[in-house]
Image: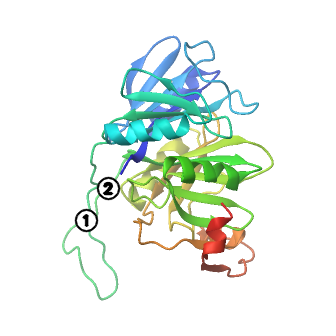
Amino acid sequence: MAITGILSITYVTNDLEAGRQFHEQLGLTLVHASAHGIDFALPDGSSVLLRTEGSPDLPAPLADQDNGVREVCWAVNDVASLAALAAGIAVDRPVCWSGETECAFHDDAGLSVRLRLAQLKPISAESDPTNAPGRVERLNQLRRWYDRAIPLQMQHVVFSSPQARAQARFYVQRLGFRISDIQEEGGVFLRAPGSVQHHNLYWQRAEMTAFRHVSYGVANLDALMAGAAYMARHGVKSRLGLGRHRISSTFFYYMPNPCGGDAEYSTDTDCLDDHWVPRVWGRVFGHIWWLAQGREQEPEERMRMATEEDLKLL
């Protein structure tokens, strides 16, 4: 399987207290705090690390960004896979080892990437029975009420680049990621080989190389909207509001993060394995299926199965 998912992300922020407050409100568990950093944990064993610019061993910034994610650490599930991946990377760039179970390097965009021997913990969100006309799954029973959202895992991280396909190529050819879907003039959605999430990484085409957002998976739509309401009561509001993507089918709710980029509550994302055939989507058609606030005009339908030629372009 090799890489199974996101093990940790490291932010650099010039306002550590604002970052602490935001991520606690978001629903993460604080496990350690000091003058130079704060660590948060998620139920699957992954972590979100906040650091100040003066912290030791901090990676260089991505492009010209001060705030934002400086490093992504991926979980690798066995020693042989870790050694093979590191050897393949070392053919054309430095690889720095920390003991025998962890190594770091830079991808083609200049982002610091870390691989660590680790097992993400299995998680299981409770299933809430859903009624619909003619289908009764919940009889004489109230639906569960959520006070707020509790992120269970980091489902994906997003970066942008003028050469998004070239950046995606590195992860496919060198780290074994699978192509989930392609967005015309948009970017490439990538799934870690040991994951069933539609995508763990998205390289988005844009004029500048930058960090965009991290997606936090929650139990269901009720939990997502309870979290959105909780964040709004604490002064954090979304620019788009609730919506659903066509690509990946994900319910989304993006919020500005004081540490850089956005944080996304997400749920009901498509799950894939190696039998999936990637699609090629029109950029606007694939991006959003619907928004709660509505749109004046629906985009032209554009979606087709990817061909070998499409995949070779990477």
Q: Which residue is mark 2?
A: 145
**Residue 80: quarter of image:** top left
Note whether residue 140 is visible: yes
Q: Which residue is mark 1?
A: 142
Residue 30 lies, in percent from the top left, at: 39, 27
Q: Amino acid at mark 2?
A: Trp
Seen at 21% across and 68% down, the residue is: 141
**Residue 311: quarter of image:** bottom right
163 up-or-down from 259: above or below: below
User: Is there CB contact under 8 Å for labels 2 and 1?
Assistant: yes
Q: Secondary structure at mark 1?
A: loop
Image position of 147 (left or right of 239)? left
Residue 39 lies, in percent from the top left, at: 43, 25
Seen at 71% across and 78% down, the residue is: 298
195 up-or-down from 209: above or below: below
Seen at 50% across and 18% down, the residue is: 37
Seen as rendered, the residue at the extreme bottom is 134
Q: Secondary structure at mark 2?
A: loop
